[in-house]
Image: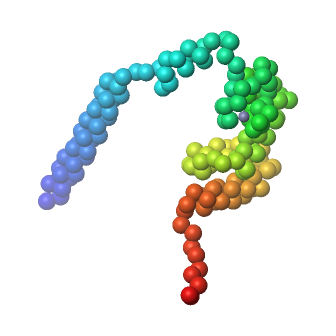
Amino acid sequence: MRMELDHLDGLLASGVLLITFGFIRCLAHWVRAAPATPDPWAEEIEVLMQDPATPPTCLRCSITQSPGAWFCPHCGTAVGPYNNLMPYVNAFSIGEVFRSSILDRVRPGLMMWLGCVLLALHYWIVTPFYLFRVARHFRHLRLADGAPVTEVSSPS
Ligand SMILES: [Zn+2]
């Protein structure tokens, strides 16, 4: 009886292994067969982006930037091409990331949380204060997005 159970376990493990291998093989075939498109945008936008005469724009608010600008005068986002390579300007860029994660309207998902935690761990002295502010801000964002809020109904 014991020998039959061991044989059954071996068969079950082999079946699971075979199904997993087949799934991975089908997934790899599906990825390889997918059409490869280098850019998700239209051809005319690609032409505009490659044209050196096209003025740079802010990634957040799409306002045209002056050449050589480091930060958007409208929203404060870092727009300079080498902001993160210059030590002095890099400090302002990181400050802008800290500021936007606790004040701006962001999508409070898992990746945002992971980024905030990694950023906070790098600047360990502010970690508890920063993560507290992030948690509070994300909670407010979720409530503002229509999450169920418990209301106390008054008798009428
Ligand atoms: Zn902007």
Q: Residue at x 76, y 45 (%)?
A: 99
Q: Quadrant of residue 136?
A: bottom right
Q: Residue at x 56, y 87 (%)?
A: 156
Viewport quadrant of the N terminus = bottom left
Q: Residue at x 31, y 29 (%)?
A: 30
Q: Position of residue 141 (x, y in %)?
A: 63, 56
Q: Residue furthest bottom?
A: 155
Q: Position of residue 21 (x, y in %)?
A: 28, 36
Whether residue 21 sits left or right of residue 120 in the image: it is: left
Q: Quadrant of residue 52?
A: top right
**Image coloring type:** rainbow
Q: Residue furthest right?
A: 88
Q: Is residue 137 visible?
A: yes
Q: Nearer the viewer, residue 130 or 156?
A: 156
Q: Quadrant of residue 131?
A: bottom right
Q: Residue furthest front?
A: 156
Q: Position of residue 46 (x, y in %)?
A: 54, 17
Q: Is residue 21 visible?
A: no
Say above or below: 68 vs 77: above
Q: Position of residue 95 (x, y in %)?
A: 79, 40
Mark count: 0
Ligand 1 is located in which of the four quadrants? top right
Q: Residue at x 77, y 36 (%)?
A: 74
Whether residue 69 sits left or right of residue 25 in the image: it is: right
